[in-house]
Image (cartoon, rainbow, N blue to C red):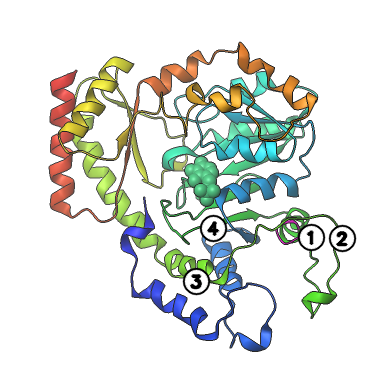
Amino acid sequence: MPGFELFSDLERKEVNDVLDNGVLMRYGFDGMRKGHWKAKELEAELAQTFASKHVQLVSSGTAAVSVALAAAGIGAGDEVIMPTFTFVASFEAIMMLGAIPVLVDIDDTLTLDPKAVEAAITPKTKAVMVVQMCGSMGDMEALQTICKSHNLVFLEDACQAIGGTYNGKPLGSIADLGCFSFDFVKTITCGEGGAVVTNNKDFYINADHYSDHGHDHIGQDRGAETHPFLGYNFRISELHAAVGLAQVRRLPEFIALQKRNYNVLKNAIARVPGVSFRRVPKGGEESYAFLNFFLPDLDSVQKVVAAFKEGGVDACWNYYQNNWHYIKEWHHLKEQKSLFPISQEVKEGLKYLDTKTFDQSDAYIGRNISCLIKLSWTEEEVAERAEKMAKIIRATL
Ligand SMILES: *Cc1c(COP(=O)(O)O)cnc(C)c1O
């Protein structure tokens, strides 16, 4: 998945444009910047790439989720439904706004189970956030239908699925708001960076203002701009945007490489009895950032992961006990360890985590192995890796 693997003169050229005029800030300084507006240019490119009317760049993917929620008016005491398998950023962003993360089971898509979503809806529910984990997607049609019928905001975290599609539409562009990360290990990188995409003009204007202290961005002079509402600083810098500009132009090349490498590995292990794959919803095409497969049980998964490591097959994980991605080890969330006081309403709202079990999620994550697909492998390296993987799994099961 990492775009950094192919860092090149193209990225260097864009960064040098910025260094030549010294304007590292995305807003203002018109006279000094010699026509270079890297953040603006990147937003225009991303609007094309993600087939969305509006794009707001921000400082990270976590910032993107926070800004998207804020732009949709999610705040104190609102419940946001999210999956048990994601990145910690999901609940961080929700809680930063004083809202309540309501975690629900995943299914064999490795993200939200529509039935679990429906069962979790209460009068306080304001939004549903699907997280397109490991390059694939949830049942978008079913989830969209639920959101429409309950009048909920539908958010799509596509940080790990850059370049995937559903019914021909780019992942991230399907829900009311989509979020992307361009951190150092994502499919395309800015070093640090993220984006909110939407076709809703009001959401976009909110995101634009909120991510820059509430500035209205309509004045000629930054100093003369007003603040229609309170905001924050989630701005991206020109340097980061410059890297992203070179990277987004290479996205088709990155996806083609991922797909080639993914298919070699998948074809090799598909022949091993006991191996099955995550479900990709009908009409969906993965970004091929990861190859995810299931084995019969957690024990065989742990043995295979250990044997992979031993045998030199790196970058394959089981997330069951991973404290970044799965609820099992999110003790800081379950124990409500906050640096500063959290509201009584949020405390009450999180109490379900003391007792609720997630057996269905445990069953899928416990049996899953997720392998990162690298761009830099040669054809020989992928072939060798595929053979090794199949051999190890066969020997272990
Ligand atoms: C990486 C990631 C984020 C956060 O992105 P950062 O840019 O690292 O803040 C959010 N959600 C998911 C699913 C991610 O993988």
Secondary structure beneath disc 2? loop
Disc 4 to disc 1, C-alpha distance: 19 Å
The residue wearing badge 3 is 242
Q: Is mark 3 within 8 Å of ligand 1?
A: no
Look at the image and tell me whether residue 172 can be seen.
no
Q: Is mark 4 within 8 Å of ligand 1?
A: yes
Q: Nearer the viewer, residue 201 or 64?
A: 64
CA gap, disc 3 and disc 2 = 29 Å
Q: Residues at badges 1 and 2 in contact (C-beta under 8 Å)? A: yes
- Measured in 3D between alpha carbons, the distance from the residue under mark 4 to the one under mark 3, in whole angstroms, is 11 Å
> Eyeballing the image, is 98 above or below 200?
above
Q: Residue 29 occupies which quadrant of the picture?
A: bottom right
Above or below residue 73? Residue 208 is below
- State which tag comes first along the sequence, 3 or 2: 2
Query: For the residue carrying disc 4, how many other residues have a C-alpha within 10 Å: few (<14), some (14-19), or many (20+)?
Result: many
Q: Nearer the viewer, residue 174 or 231?
A: 231
Q: Is residue 352 left or right of residue 186?
A: right
Instruction: Please name the residue that numbered disc 4 is placed on.
Output: 193
Type of amino acid at the residue the image marks with label 3: Ala
Q: Which mark is residue 214?
A: 1
Q: Residues within 10 Å of mark 3 (few under 14, many from 20)?
A: many
